[in-house]
Image: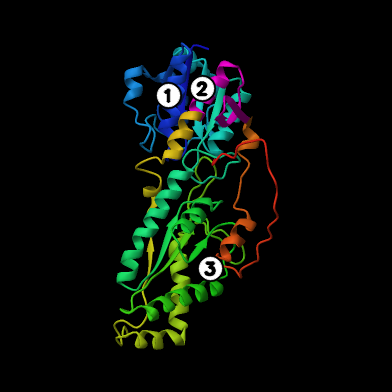
Amino acid sequence: MKNIGIITSGGDCGGLNGVIKGAALTAIAKGMTAWIIPNGYAGLYNLVDLKQITKLTPERIEAIEVFMAGSEAGNSRVKISKIKDDKKYDRIKEGLKKFNLDALVIAGGDDTGSVVADLAGQGIPCVHAPKTMDLDLMPYSVGGDSTINRIADQLRDLRTTGRTHNRIIVMEVFGRYAGHTAFRGGVAADVDAILIPEIPVDFDVLYKHVKDCFVKRIEESDVHAGTAMVVVAEGLRDASGNELVDMSSEPDSFGHRRLLGAGKYVVKQIEDRIKADPEIKEFMKRTGQFVAGVYEIPEVREIRPSHLVRCGFSSAMDSNFGLEVGAAAVELITQKVLGVTVVSYAGGKIEYMDVKEAIVQRLVEPSDVSLFETFGISFGRKPEKPQAQGVKVSGKPVRVY
């Protein structure tokens, strides 16, 4: 193994530049050379047509800032097996041969991991560095901590505008199947309600909780000012468990259709109940807000930070973890341990698992949710009591990731 190609695939997030830098520096330390294959799997498929690729010299590596989110290598959402080319795998192998690339370090999430398994099955040497801001892979993945911190920051910031105008704020964030980042970001921002795909929402329960929080704060304020905060993952499901999908949209190469807009849906559900609630008019009058025909009910506003939660800067944790898994991927390649996902690199030991096992979807545990329900956060259902049991552990340090 003399030459390593580095690919980042899928969505951008914090920590990816750490993967690139960790892999490249480790390759140099082992007398190898690392190269960037640009633009994800699209770049890999078109590698044979490229005139040149970027060599990661010490000088070029220094220009890659580990604390910056995004990816110096560029990403794309392309599923190799869906490419309509019967010779696609031969084409990829020709591209690797053209640039004398012996193996690949590939950073990405579950969709990317499925392609890693596919490529490995076709005899293409590669190792998977886990990356997804949704945190829905089995091991911890680059990007999750950065996104949670950005969600929490934005929710905390929105409190000022919500309180100034006595508004109910609904912020929609990423999370199609798993609500980890909405959950943890919402908890860290002290929000009133967190809506995630794992728990179908009873909007009557949600409305009562949000209304109670909102009304209490404004009535107890000496200037009659207050807000209520709701964070919702884009993959919200209604009380019947149905996903809010635009069936008229074209699915992408991984089969995902566009979602309809969970934030707008939640706003509409709350607004409908506010308008039909006879107590709201009296509340508005009691607090000196009511103006007939002009301002009769509180405003409910939707905010969608969208890609702002995955851009900008990497958290310290993701910067560290990215460097570690990038280095671990190269170490595994040199040991000819291929077609696997890196789990951790600590204490001189690299933990890894089969890619197909690593990309099994990990969802929010209901038992975790019930704990925070006792703290007064609504998850759009009737609260459940947590069932906790003490378990003694020993012999192995507990890592934060």
In the figure, 292 relative to 327: above or below? below
Tell whether label 3 touches label 1 (CB within 8 Å). Answer: no
Which three-letter amino acid code belongs to the residue tagged 3? Answer: Gly
Which of marks 1 and 2 precedes in the sequence? 1
Location of residue 397 by image quarter:
top right
Which residue was labeled with disc 2? 104
Tell whether label 3 touches label 2 (CB within 8 Å). Answer: no
Circle 3: element type: loop
Q: Residue at x 36, y 41 (%)?
A: 313
Tell whether label 1 touches label 2 (CB within 8 Å). Answer: yes
Location of residue 159 by image quarter:
bottom left
Q: Quadrant of the C terminus?
A: top right
Which three-letter amino acid code belongs to the residue tagged 2? Answer: Leu
- State the CA–CA distance, disc 1 to disc 3: 48 Å
Which of marks 3 and 1 precedes in the sequence? 1
Q: Position of residue 135 (x, y in %)?
A: 53, 45
Q: Residue at x 56, y 34 (%)?
A: 113
Q: Position of residue 108 (x, y in %)?
A: 50, 35
In the figure, 205 relative to 27: above or below? below
In the figure, 391 relative to 376: above or below? above
Q: Residue 344 magenta-drawn?
A: yes
Q: Position of residue 254 (x, y in %)?
A: 54, 41
- State the CA–CA distance, disc 2 to disc 1: 9 Å
